[in-house]
Amino acid sequence: MAKTYALSQLTFHTYINTTPQHNSIENNIVKFVFNTKSKNSLSLQRRQNNYINGGLNLWNLKTRELAQKAWLFERYLHQRVSNTPSSYIKLWEEELKNNNNNQTTTKQNQLQLHWQCKQAWTQLKTPQNKQTHYEHLPKLKKIYEDMMTTQSPEHNKFIPTPGQKEIMTKINSKHLPFKEIKKIINMKGRDLLWRYTLKALPKIYNMPCQQCGEDETSEHIFFNCKAHIKNTQEIFNYTLTKCGHTTHTWNVKILNHLQIALVANLIAIIFDKIWHKRNKLIHDEKEIIIHRQQVIRELIKTQRAAWDRTQAVINKTLRIKSKQRPEEQNKLDSLISLKLLQFSRQWNSPLHAIELPKHLKKYNNSLSTFYK
C-alpha cells in the first residue's frame, strides 16, 4: 500500500510535469508503515533493502522518479521505429529536433518532459544507443536497480547491527533467516518473526516484564519468560510429534528450523500467541493461557491457505496446458506433479493432510507425507 501511494504521487507529477515533494511523500510513508511513537523505525537505507536482507523493499523516491523517466525514454527509442508508435512519439521527435538545433538549452526546454526523460536516460550506466532495431526493452525494475547500484555500491547489502550479530552468534550462523521467514504463510506470525530477527519489535525498552518481573528483552519475551515457557515447550513438542517431526528445545536456535513450511509456520503461530498473551496483560490487564488446540487450529487453517495458493497456481497451469502442443503438455504435467510433491513434503502430516480434488488425482494418487 505504501508503494502504491508513492507510485501514484510520482506518476501524477511526472505526467503533469511538476516536481514531486520527495521528503513529504517519504514522511507520509514512514507514518503509514511505522507507529510514530515507536523508536525502532528502520533507517532510510535499511528500509530500501530487499525483504531477504532485512528491509521493506521501499523505493528511494528520487531515484525511482529518474528510473521511470529513463524507462519512458527507452520506450520512446523502442517505439520510434515500430509500425504502431504511440501518439507522443512524433511530438517528441519535433521537440528533440528543435532542441538539437538550438545552440543553448533554454529554461523552457528544460521544463519539457521529453528533455527531462532524456537527461534521466543519460544517467544509466550503459544507455542504449539509438539503434535502427531496438529489440531488448529493459524493465523499469532493472533500470531502478542499476541506478541504485551506481549511486551506492552498498545498496541492498546486509550489514548486521550489534543486536543482529548477537542472534547470528547464538544460532551459529553467518546469516539471518529472512529468506525463510518471507515464505511463511501465517502473516501475523511472519511479520512478528521478521521483526524479532531484525531486532525491531514495537516495545518500550528497559522495562520489566509484566508477566514475571525480569528484564524484558526480545529474547526474554519469547524464549525465557517463566510465565509461559513450560507451556510453550509442551505445545511445541506435542504438535511436532503429532505432525511426525523431530522435537526441538524452544529457544532462539529454532530459527535454524524454518526450512520446512509446516514447522516454520508453527513457530510463527506460537510467536504470535506469545506476543498476544503479553500485550493482553499490558493493555487490557487480562492474563490468558495459550492452548495447544488453538495453535493446532491455526496451523490447519494456515495449511489450507497454503493449499489454496498451490491449487491456484496448478489451475492456471492447467489452463495454459490446454492451449499447448502435446510435448509441451507433458512438461506441464511434470510441473504439476512436482508442485503436488513439494506441497506434500512441506505441509502434509499425520495431524492433517489435504485431500486431492478429483481432477488432480491423476497427477498424484495421494498427497502422502514425506519427511526428508
Image (cartoon, rainbow, N blue to C red):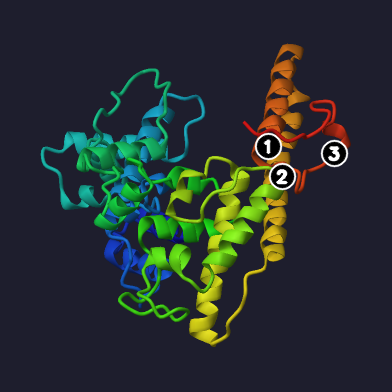
Quadrant holding the C terminus: top right
Question: From the viewer's perspective, is the residue at label 2 or at label 1 nearer?
Answer: 1
Q: Which residue bears the numbered disc 3? A: 357
In the image, residue 191 above or below residue 177: below
Q: Residue 307 has which mark?
A: 2
The residues bearing labels 3 and 2 have C-alpha atoms spaced at a distance of 11 Å
Contact check, label 2 and label 1, Cβ < 8 Å:
yes
- Residue type for callout 2: Trp
Q: Which residue bears the numbered disc 1? A: 343
Give the image quarter of residue 361: top right
Q: Secondary structure at mark 3?
A: loop
Q: Tell whether 49 sits left or right of 313.
A: left
Q: Position of residue 329 (x, y in %)?
A: 74, 18
Give the image quarter of residue 19: bottom left
Q: Secondary structure at mark 2?
A: helix
In the image, residue 151 above or below residue 48: above
Outermost residue toward the right in this view: 358
- Residue for point 53% across, 40% down: 259
- Residue for point 37% across, 80% down: 208
Give the image quarter of residue 345: top right
Q: Position of residue 24 (x, y in %)?
A: 31, 68
- Residue type for callout 1: Phe
Of the two numbered discs 3 and 2 on the same chain, state the one appearing first in sequence: 2
